[in-house]
Image: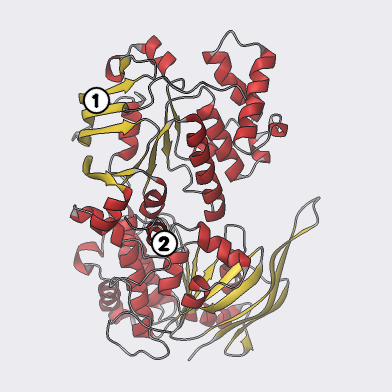
């Protein structure tokens, strides 16, 4: 399929976020994001982990300039480093530039997106819509071909172009959303809890797909989830967010083995290991009778 | 000592224009006091149908539910006695408590309905139950659900389930809606109570890791059929059925991941 040429800029950051703060201007005001700074490398998967209300989605919306009042960006800058060499200050874009930027340079798969497809329009219609808006010079035939290519790419198959959302499973709808996010071959894709509502087997397939597509097209990913074990497996680096601040940022393995911040360690210890030793936090299961005590390493 | 047994349970749903759908296919197992049975499987595998059949919200198409070897009553006082013995904790603590009523009301109701304690003892019993689920009884007893966090609400739901001194507890995804950092706390509470009360627990979940650690035995359900069962560690660490293996391999497991990566 005739998707994009390798980017001219192949190394260095694709996104630099510096000292971004976002406030919900309600009474009393809520500082949802506080002085957050990070860079996103080209082709990198950056995991963003935190619990509900920590500000991770607000931060993503801020980067995409999708915030609506009462949310306001109170400080900081987000700069996109385009593959062609220009830098785009996202915080300063006007409406028209923003429209051209969004989806073409950086796209997003929203939380619960698979339920956001229009129920009365076909998948094909919704995919070609993107081209109608962003590539007005494409012909009808080109748009349909391209939409079919995208469905093939994410494993749904072009024979589903004429299907309605309710005719697809949750996993397939989520793949359609990923296809939509890929449609303009963006350099950055933000995925907000893309697999949370899906079964582990489907989740694994979709993650594999995202990873393969990234290899192929070289885009960068910000992957937002509360599922830290998942992030540890798929991310290059992980940022841990709490109460609006990044408390730690490091390589996945470093976070796993040598987390520096107590909150990171607390989060890590919140997930019992699937195949490893049970931690001290898991009560020992008495083999037959209540033997009492809280020792571990119970051999079966 | 109360034992609940499901014997050759099959449940079919008739689907208009599409024949029948088999939700459960010849499922048999026993819940015994003092042990936790973990029930894992993907969505649609029939996990919640089992919970509905145990709680008598659905009737099996064939097969029997037996409490201490006698069939579970369908109505009347006997059914009420059964419900008193078999209690349930639901997935969504935001939906399972009535927003109009105080915490006190939620826990009082089963106490009064089942005449667990004499009327003059109700207040003390409610406070005792709240303390047992590690809640500050004085601070919370007259609050309403919206004033509580998700974790606090789930503890209230657990206190309500314990109020009628059941011998069996069905917990259907009891922590999947809670924030990650408080999940283990609620599971540990359930495990502690299970031990103290010698409860038989059915822990229904899609999360293999907590299923392994919080269950004595595990049962893997696929499309209404039990494909594997055994001691929890055996099922997860040495799965015999390919489906169990597929589920396990698809679940995130950083320990394995970094060990496989060569640990540099």
- Looking at the picture, do discs 1 and 2 lie on one chain? no
| x and y percentages locating residue A245 in the rendered image | 21, 40
Q: Residue at x 37, y 51 (%)?
A: A232
Q: Secondary structure at mark 1?
A: strand
| x and y percentages locating residue B132 in the rendered image | 28, 75
Q: Secondary structure at mark 2?
A: helix
| x and y percentages locating residue B1 in the rendered image | 48, 92
Q: Is residue A178 above or below residue B254?
A: above
Label 1 Cα neighbours within 10 Å, binned few <14 / some 14-19 / many ≥20? some
**Closer to us: B255 or A159:** B255
Which corner quadrant holds the C terminus of chain A? bottom left
Label 2 Cα neighbours within 10 Å, binned few <14 / some 14-19 / many ≥20? some
**Closer to us: B116 or B247:** B247
Q: Residue at x 63, y 22 (%)?
A: A146
The reply to whether dot 1 and dot 2 touch (C-beta < 8 Å) is no
Q: Which residue is mark 2?
A: B256
**Closer to us: A82 or B181:** A82
| x and y percentages locating residue B194 in the rendered image | 38, 80
Disc 1 chain ID: A
Q: Which residue is mark 1?
A: A73
């Amino acid at each position: 399929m005739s998707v994009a040429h390798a980017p001219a800029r192949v190394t260095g950051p694709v996104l630099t976020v510096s000292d971004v703060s976002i406030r919900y201007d309600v009474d009393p005001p809520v500082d949802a994001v506080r002085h957050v700074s990070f860079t996103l490398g080209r082709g990198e998967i950056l995991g963003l982990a935190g619990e509900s209300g920590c500000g991770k989605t607000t931060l993503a919306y801020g980067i995409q300039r999708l915030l609506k009042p009462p949310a306001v960006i109170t400080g900081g800058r987000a700069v996109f480093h385009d593959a062609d060499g220009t830098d785009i200050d996202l915080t300063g874009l006007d409406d028209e530039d923003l429209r051209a930027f969004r989806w073409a340079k950086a796209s997003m798969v929203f939380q619960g997106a698979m339920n956001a497809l229009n129920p009365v329009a076909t998948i094909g219609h919704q995919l070609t819509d993107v081209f109608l808006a962003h590539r007005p010079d494409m012909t009808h035939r080109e748009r349909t071909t391209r939409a079919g290519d995208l469905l093939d790419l994410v494993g749904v198959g072009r024979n589903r172009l004429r299907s309605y959302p309710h005719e697809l499973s949750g996993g397939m709808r989520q793949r359609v959303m990923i296809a939509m996010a890929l449609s303009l071959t963006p350099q950055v894709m933000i995925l907000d809890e893309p697999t949370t509502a899906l079964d582990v087997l489907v989740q694994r397939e979709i993650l594999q797909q995202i990873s393969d597509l990234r290899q192929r097209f070289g885009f960068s990913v910000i992957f937002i989830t509360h599922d830290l074990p998942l992030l540890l497996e798929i991310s290059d680096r992980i940022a841990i967010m709490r109460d609006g601040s990044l408390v730690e940022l490091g390589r996945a393995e470093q976070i796993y083995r040598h987390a520096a911040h107590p909150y990171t360690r607390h989060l890590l210890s919140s997930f019992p290991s699937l195949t490893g030793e049970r931690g001290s936090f898991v009560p020992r299961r008495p083999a037959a009778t209540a033997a009492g005590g809280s020792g571990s390493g119970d051999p079966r | 000592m109360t034992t609940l047994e499901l014997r050759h349970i099959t449940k079919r749903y008739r689907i208009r224009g599409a024949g029948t759908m088999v939700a459960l296919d010849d499922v048999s197992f026993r819940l015994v006091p003092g042990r936790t049975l973990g029930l894992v499987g993907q969505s649609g595998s029939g996990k919640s149908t089992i919970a509905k059949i145990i709680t008598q919200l659905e009737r099996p198409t064939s097969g029997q539910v037996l409490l201490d070897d006698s069939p579970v009553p369908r109505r009347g006082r006997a059914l009420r006695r059964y419900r008193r013995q078999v209690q349930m904790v639901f997935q969504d603590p935001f939906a399972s408590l009535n927003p109009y009523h105080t915490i006190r009301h939620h826990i009082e109701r089963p106490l009064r309905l089942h005449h667990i304690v004499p009327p003059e003892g109700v207040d003390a019993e409610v406070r005792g139950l709240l303390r047992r689920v590690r809640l500050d009884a004085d601070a919370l007893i007259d609050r309403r659900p919206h004033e509580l966090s998700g974790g606090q609400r789930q503890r209230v739901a657990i206190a309500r389930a314990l109020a009628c001194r059941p011998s069996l507890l069905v917990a259907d995804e009891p922590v999947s809606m809670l924030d990650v950092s408080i999940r283990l706390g609620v599971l540990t509470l359930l495990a502690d109570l299970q031990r103290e009360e010698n409860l038989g627990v059915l822990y229904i979940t899609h999360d293999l890791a907590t299923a392994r650690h919080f269950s004595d035995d595990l049962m893997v359900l696929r499309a209404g059929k039990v494909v594997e069962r055994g001691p929890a560690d055996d099922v997860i660490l040495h799965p015999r059925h390919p489906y169990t293996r597929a589920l396990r391999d698809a679940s995130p497991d950083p320990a394995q991941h970094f060990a496989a990566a060569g640990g540099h």
